[in-house]
Image (cartoon, rainbow, N blue to C red):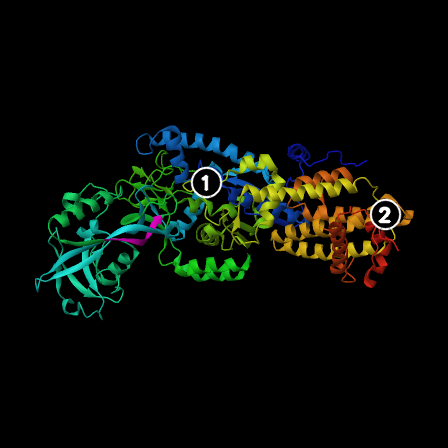
Amino acid sequence: MPKLREKRWSTKLEKSLLKKWEKEKVYKFRPSSKKIFSIDTPPPYPSGQIWHIGAVAHYSQIDMIARTARMLGFNVFFPIGIDRNGIGVERYAEKRFNVSLHEIPREEFLSYCKKALDELEAEMIDIMKRLGISGDFENYYQTDSESYRKLTQATFIELWNKGLIYTDTRPNNFCPNCRTTIADAEVIYEELQTELVYVKFKVRETKEDLIVATTRPELICACQAVLVHPEDERYKRFVGRHAIIPIYGREVPILANTSVDPKFGSGVVMICSYGDSEDVRLFRELKLQEIVAVDEEGKMTKNAGVYSGLTTKEARKQIVEDLEKNGLLIKKESITHRTPVCEKCRTPIEIIPMNEFYLKQLPFKDSIRKCGEAMIFYPEMHRQLLLNWIDSITIDWPISRRRYYATEIPVWYCKSCGQPQVPKPGKYYRPWKDKPPFEKCSNCGGKDFIGETRTFDTWFDSSISPLFISKYWQDEKFFKRAYPVSVRPQGKDIVRTWLYYTLLRCYLAVGVFPFKAAWISGYCVDEKGEKMSKSKGNVINPEPIIEKYGADAFRFWSAQEASLGFDFRASEERIANASKFLTKLWNIARFISMFPVVKKAKLMPADEWVLGELAETAKAVQEGYKNFNFFIPATRMREFLWNLFANHYIEMVKARAYGKGFSKQEQKAAWFTLHTCLRISLKLLAPIIPFVTDYIWRSLYSNKSIHTEKFEKIPWKKKEKLTEQIVDFNSKIWGIKKEKGVPLTAEIQIIIPKELKKMEKDLKAMHNIKG
């Protein structure tokens, strides 16, 4: 009678184990003298969208890192956080409660955001727990908590006092939809359909028409120069002369510049403030005087004349119509244009001059690059993502945002002299609401102040997560033991933001880089390899999938789908296929559970063969675990258990295990080998599929959880290369019997190959070989 009574593995058993783990506090972090392995777990962001199946798979693998480290003997510190700041939260609150950030009092809007977050957070925590995440949920942190925001502000104050933060008015990326400045790292490029219009400019000196091609006709009012390529024979004679801007009648110089592509459009471009980043560069290079055409609401300024107050889209349409009406429009072409858009909302950005706070980063590029070259990357290929981003940085980081639900910038301004006043670190400040923590201005002695209303970029918050989890400013003793953290796991899409900004912020704060290694996962795509999106209708909700197939099936799919760092595909069919392995493992364990556990035995050749295969597999599996590449243990263990152990070894020793025609000693050898292979396999699979392995382990081998165990050294070695011969021989016999249409138990006469003679007794019993 099998000790495993259930005929099939059930997801209900997973839920009972969750309760048992919680009651036993299996994963509780207990500070000790052992070396701490700390994980800078990415705090998931509850934005109101379905939690992406790729993100859930990502977190299941982060949990595998923690479980692996425990089984390697480390004292694992696995904090869990929730990222509760930013535009996504604000947008969800506006939609959820039918309110507008700009139309209700700030404090009232913040309360809506908090309420929305509490609802979303509960769902997210439930999914993480159901998935078997072994983190510290009792003490999980929130990035909008007073303690977290206090630390964000404290590090800002320290950097301000060091002279590393300043304010300046300069052209910035501005999202008209989010209504805030965004950093270069938050700008992505998309190929969008747009119109290239050909407009007549009049050359003042010759009265000739000069045709300018532009995708931004609404910015004509901000044009300060017209450029042609110096080698373009069509326009050489115009260089040094002046063009008259249509509609507005202003004169601007015609200049030669090698940045112009003679093959694009008409080969003549207008330089405006500011159509794109190239305009910004050329304005600086040519020392042109800016004309602000777009305001902070994404509308045309008074400099646009009759188009003032229109959105850029409305102004573009109207100007094109007016140009056409006045005979100034030559033609229009529909083109695909590489357009900078806001990463969060996909709205095309504007570049407008704004006064913002900046954190110096240019002086530290070399130091951060050296860190990027020295730290460990899992996998190595993603190191270049970081280095390429560092090399591309040309300006300091604008860290202020014109939003509400984020950490406030702790600055007050003297009403008399305008001097910014920064408080002492150690408290959470809300300058838009709180009284200033000082009585008079340090510059002029004035006693009246105006509080700053802006907040920090959310990356300015989240980039201190290694400091926060290591208890910087809270517990100096623990900080010294836990910082730098052991590993930063994250997706490749936020290397240029979260990874880079964390290196910068923590280095500037404490002079030591925040982690020893970065673990970078790929993207999750659909069955066809396409990115998932609501518009395509290919987004998969992970919750019903986990309920249907179980957390272990989901986890095993995520591990075996692709090697670390590569993109991986998701579909219900793939997860269903992964669940078949759990069924196979359960059937193997249930069969073995019929036999007693024996501590030692005199092995037969077939036992030595499979234990040698197990040893070789275990070596590769443990190497995969050490590199936190779970594809290797998942695929190697599946291959061993299904294709070798179950299909060949178990079939070879069934008769011996039952004691049919074998001595007691030979029978015990089969029992020993079966249990040894199962016991070690359970350990080797435990980080990936924690539920089924723990249930089998507790049922057969211990009253304690498998997750308190360590990986073990395998004492056997692969002595002979017999696997191919065994597989070929067995497959040959099965093929013959199938061809004859007889059962596999039917008698057969066949010569056993010389190299397999030592296993003759097991093979004869397996195949019913006579003679």
Q: Is residue 391 above or below residue 642?
A: below
Query: In what element is the residue under mark 1?
Result: helix
As drawn, which residue projects farthest toward the front?
740
Question: Magenta stretch containing residue 338, yes or no?
Answer: yes
Q: How many marks?
A: 2
- Residues 769 and 240: in front is 769
As drawn, which residue projects farthest toward the right?
663
Answer with left or right where residue 728 lies relative to residue 100. Answer: right
Q: Which residues are magenta?
A: 333-341
- Image quadrant where one finds the N terminus: top right
Query: In what element is the residue under mark 2?
Result: helix
Local packing at callout 1 (Cα closer than 10 Å; few below 14, some 14-19, many 20+) is: many
Give me the C-alpha separation between circle 1 and circle 2: 68 Å
Q: State the residue at coordinates (28%, 50%).
A: 194
Q: Is residue 397 above or below residue 426?
A: below
Answer with left or right where residue 95 lies relative to residue 721. Answer: left
Q: Amino acid at mark 2?
A: Arg
> Residue 604, percent across and down?
85, 54
The residue that mark 2 highlights is 656
Local packing at callout 2 (Cα closer than 10 Å; few below 14, some 14-19, many 20+) is: many
The residue that mark 1 highlights is 150
- Image quadrant where one finds the C terminus: bottom right
